[in-house]
Each structure stands twice: as C-alpha cells, then as structure tokens.
Amino acid sequence: MSEIAGSPVAGPAGGDFALADGFPVAGREEWRALVAGVLRKAGRPVDGDGGAAVEDALATRLADGIVTRPLYAADDAPSVPPGFPGAAPYVRGARPAGTVGGWDVRQRHADPDPARTNDAVLTDLENGATSLWLVTGEGGLPLAGLPAALDGVLLDLAPVVLEPGPDFEPAARLLLDVAEERGVGAAALRGGFGADPLGLVARTGDAGPAGDLAGRLRAAAGLAVRTHRDLPGMWAVSVDALPYHEAGGSDAQELGCALATGVAYLRELTASGLPVDAALGQLEFRYAAGADQFLTIAKLRAARRMWARVAEVAGAGAAAGAQRQHAVTSRVMMTRRDPWVNMLRTTVAALGAGVGGAESVTVLPFDEALGLSDAFARRIARNTSSVLVSESHLGRVIDPAGGSWYVERLTDDLARAAWAWFQELERAGGQAEALRSGLVADRIAAEWERRSRLLATRREPVTGVSEFADVSEAPVVRPPAPRPPGGGLPRVRRDEAYEALRARADAREAATGVRPRVFLAALGPAAAHAARASFAANVFQAAGLVPVHEPVSVDAATAGAAFAASGAEVACLCGSDALYDERAVGVAEALRAAGAGRVLLAGRPGEREAELRAAGVDGFVYAGCDVVAFLASVLDTTGHEEGLEGKREA
C-alpha cells in the first residue's frame, strides 16, 4: 500500500494537484483495525485490536507451504530484485520486449489419421496458429504418416515441434528429409525435435537398465550437437514438466523436477562437447498453465529465475541464461461433464501463461478430455490466444504483472520451495535416480492425496462437477483418442472422483430406465428450508442424483405420503436448526416407515446426533464434509447398478 495522499500530479492546466487531497493517509495498522472490526461482527474475533492476527485470519494456505496474504505492501517485496525484462535473472521475461507483439500460438495434434491431421494443421495455420506441435508414435500420429500430415505446410514459415517419444532420432531424420524434398534449407527450419529421455521414463516407467537410459541420453546429446552445428533455428531437447503436473504434483514439484531434468541434460550435452551457452540453447521447457492465473504467472517467472541461476553457476554468458518456455493449459483441470466450462478455464490459464512470459502457448481444446477434438473446439482453442493478444491487448504490454507486490512475493516463495525440492532430488542422485527409486512418485502421490481431500470436501470446487452440476445435460461425445503411453506416473484429473459417482448413476439409469432420486423433505416455510434445500440439491446432483423437492412443508403426518409420491429411495430433511429440534425426529420416523432406504439431514448434527440417529437419520451433509464419501454411501443405498462394470470400461 503506497501513500498517495498529497502526491503531486500534473494538473490539466500544467499545475499540480494532490490525489486524495484532504483525506487522511491510511496505513497498514489502520487497515488491520478496520478489518478486525468486520471480523468481530462476523463472529470471528481476533486478539487485541487486530495486528498481524487479522492477516493470519484471512490468509490462504496453498501447496508447498506457501501462504498468500490479504494485503501486500512495499515492505512485502522479496529481497531478490526481479531485474529488468530480457536481463538476468530473467524473472520479468526472457526478452527485453516481453510479450509485446504476442506469443507463439502452438497448437497440438495427436490424431493418428494423417489426412485428418493434415486438414486440422492447415486450418490452424490459416486461422491464427503460428507453430505446430505434433505427437508421433504411441498415442499420436504414426511416424510414417508425418510427411502426409505436413503436406502443404510451408516449413520455412511454420515451426514444427515434435513429441516423438523414444523415436526422436528417426523422427528428426524424417522431418529433415521432408524439408529437403521440398527445397527448404537447413538454415530456414524452425522448431524442435523433442528428445526427452527422462520425460519418457516419467511417462512410461521404462528406465530399463542404467546403460539403456545412459544410451538414450547420449543419443539425445548427439542430436543436440548435430542440431547446433547444422540447424541454427532448431533445438533438440525438450524438458517436459507435464508428466509431473498431470500426476498431481504441486507447482513447486513440477518446477523442481523440470529443473533437475534440465540440469541432467545440461551435464550430458556439455559432456558431449557442446559449450555451455550452446547447450543451453538446445533446451526448451514445457510447463502446465492452470486456472489460477497468479500461480501460473509466478511459476513461469520462478522457473526463469532458477534456470538463470543454474546457467550462472555453469559459467554461461549473461545472455545465455534465458529459459525458452512453452506453456500448455492444464489437463488436470479439464472436466468431462459440462466441458463447456473448460473454455473459461483455458482462457484464464492462457492469460496467466502470456502474462507470465511464455514464448509459446498451447490452449488445449475444451473437449480434449473426451477424445479427438472437433473443428469447433480447435477453433475456440486457437482463437483464445488471438482474443487475448489482439483484442485484450496483452501483446502491447511488457511484463504486465511486474511490480505487483503480490506476484513478486508469490514468485519468490514458489522459487524457494521449488529450489528446495530440486536440491533434494540432486541429493538423491539426480532426476533419473529419483524416478527409478520412487522418490518422485511417492512425493507427488502424497501431494495428490492432500489435494484430493480438498476436492472431496469441495474446499477446491469444480464448477459443473462438484458445484452446479446439471444431471440433465446431454453428454458431449467425441471419437476416442489414441491411448497415450503409460506405465509410469499416473494421469489424474480433478473431476475423477465425481466422474466415478456420475458413472454409477448413469449405470443405474441405463439398467432401470430411471435415474436415482432423492426426496428433499422441506420443514417449515421457504425462508426456513430454502438455503439448505438448495445446498443439498447441489450436492446430490454432483453424483448424478435427481433431487425431488417438495416445496410444501411436511411434518410427521404428511412426510410418508409425500415421499411415496416422489419415486425416490432416499430422503433428506431440509430446514432450520429450530425446526430440526421440533420436527426432525417425527419426520425421520415417518420417512423410514414409508420405505426410505436412507434418511439424511442437511446440516451438522450437533448435540442431538444420537437422538436423530435413533430416530432413523443415517447421515448428515454439510459444508466441509467429505462429499465424495457421503455420495458414495447414498449410491450404495439406491442399488440396482447392473451393467456398472461395462459402463466403467466404456
């Protein structure tokens, strides 16, 4: 918080006037005192007049031990200065101009049909994409189909980045052959060959004997040597951090694994004879961009800062430490239900990636989690970057986040947490050994377990899935995509626990023709039951259950008949605490007598839990409870899930 009262500013006639003139200058302590008063009125008193306890009460605790505060001022700025755009430590961008002019719009293609891929590639390039990312081999385009997929592509204008898995050498040769046949000289080619032996281990778990991995690393280094010598516009090696993010890793874990991988490659490349500066130029780093734009911005800034330090220690020239970055919108955040919301998620992620300084940005289509994307989804994906750059004018500002005390502090905190993880990986013998020993997998699994608890309790809500689910939505169907290579780190999604619940409800409907229902037994007038009825309906719909709301208040005499007419097998009482004290026992007994397989109550049980359970109340649903476990128990009650296994396999 800067003191602006009384600050002189040039007036319209050339004189000076003071902003906020006549208002008292407010400092941090005054702000704390005012907030403390609001907290007391909200039933959250803090010690004394507030002080630091006020900020602690409003702080948000993130992964990696990072805490974000409600207020940032100049004295919160990190001790390490961020420098200037295009200068070490490159926190503010790898280029002096930052993202002015926009970023490289790199679209991903993994369709195994060369003709369809070629059609999609040409459409992308004609409508805003500026480079191509082609997945070849297992999980993508057959390598032999690469020439057909690139038919009509001007290789001297459109950079091509490959993701070839283990076949990076034959893929590189084939791409060079295609260019030569079309008369494109080596000096005109742009893009990358995508050699990533350690990323392959993370994906497949196939470390093989130590000698095999060492051989792949030497082959990647040899490709880098030839690329540096003969192809000035190409790079050979990718440091893909997506496997760690997609396994459920935190941002610091993703950064630390990427840094350890980059260091391993740097050692291999310099050992093969490349000068340090040249070796650094042969690497591109790939990161996930999430729907928290500030974390995405801070992650990319922290990555550049850490890599600049590695380059400095390795003896590189000052200009060689700028990390080449490719940001990809997160697959973990993409949902299969209500996939249209993915458009919003990817827009925020792309904004964070661009503001964070990524040179290349890939926006995955909103239907990516459902199979092969259609033309509309690919169009929306590439247009997302176009709108951000050309219409929102993000491409006209150098480092838009620079100078934000919040972003600078978050960058510093994230860099320190990631550096500590990187050091642990190095002490364990490096990234290859950490993958082989299970250190990386175990640590990421623990982080995903922590995050899964947040998802299960809806402390991390997922719109359209755990919140505001639509049980009547028509499913979005896409042709199946090729199965990506597996066997290594898992691939997780935020929606997976809720998706399993929805699959059970779908199987019930497929087997019986009726979707499972829950009767919401309203107690008292709407003012007394509406809030909890709405809350309960929202929760039940997250599992694909249909809430049947009886707007007329029920009591012990009318509840049984209303339940029988609803066609439900489960009932949930919804009312105020006072009405629960007055009616809950009688209504619960009536519902149980009417055949309710399970009787629930919306709200915390309080001191009457034993009495309520004795009357037939089986469970309670409230803010902060384990919604996934609760809904699973409700589905257990509905039964009749014939065909469930086939549904799950589908």
Image: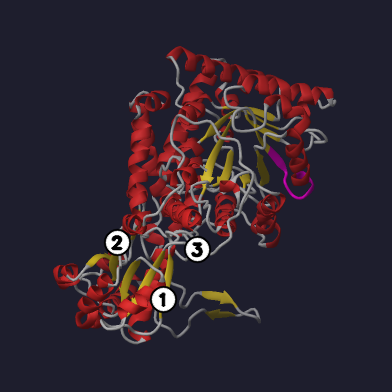
Is 131 included in the stretch rendered in magenta? yes
Judge by depth and name the residue closer to the eye, 615 or 206: 615
C-alpha gap between disc 2 and disc 3:
22 Å
Report the Cα–Cα distance between label 3 and label 1.
15 Å
Residue segment shown in magenta = 125-132
Position above or below: 492 against 165 = below
Amino acid type assigned to the residue bearing label 3 in the image: Val
Q: Residue at x 14, y 71 (%)?
A: 611
Q: Residues within 10 Å of mark 1 (few under 14, many from 20)?
A: some
- Please identify the quarter of the rendering in which residue 9 is found: bottom right
Circles 2, 3 touching at the beta carbon (< 8 Å): no
- Which of the marked residues, 3 or 1, is nearer the chain's N terminus? 3
- Provide residue 523's location: percent of width, then percent of height: 31, 82
Quarter of the rendering containing residue 45 = bottom left
Q: Amino acid at mark 1?
A: His
Secondary structure under badge 1?
Answer: strand
The answer, for residue 554, to whether it is visible in the render is yes
CA gap, disc 2 and disc 1: 22 Å
Q: State the residue position of label 3.
A: 471
Above or below: residue 339 compared with residue 317:
below
Q: Residue at x 43, y 45 (%)?
A: 251
In the picture of the structure, the residue carrying the numbered disc 1 is 549
Secondary structure, mark 2, is: loop
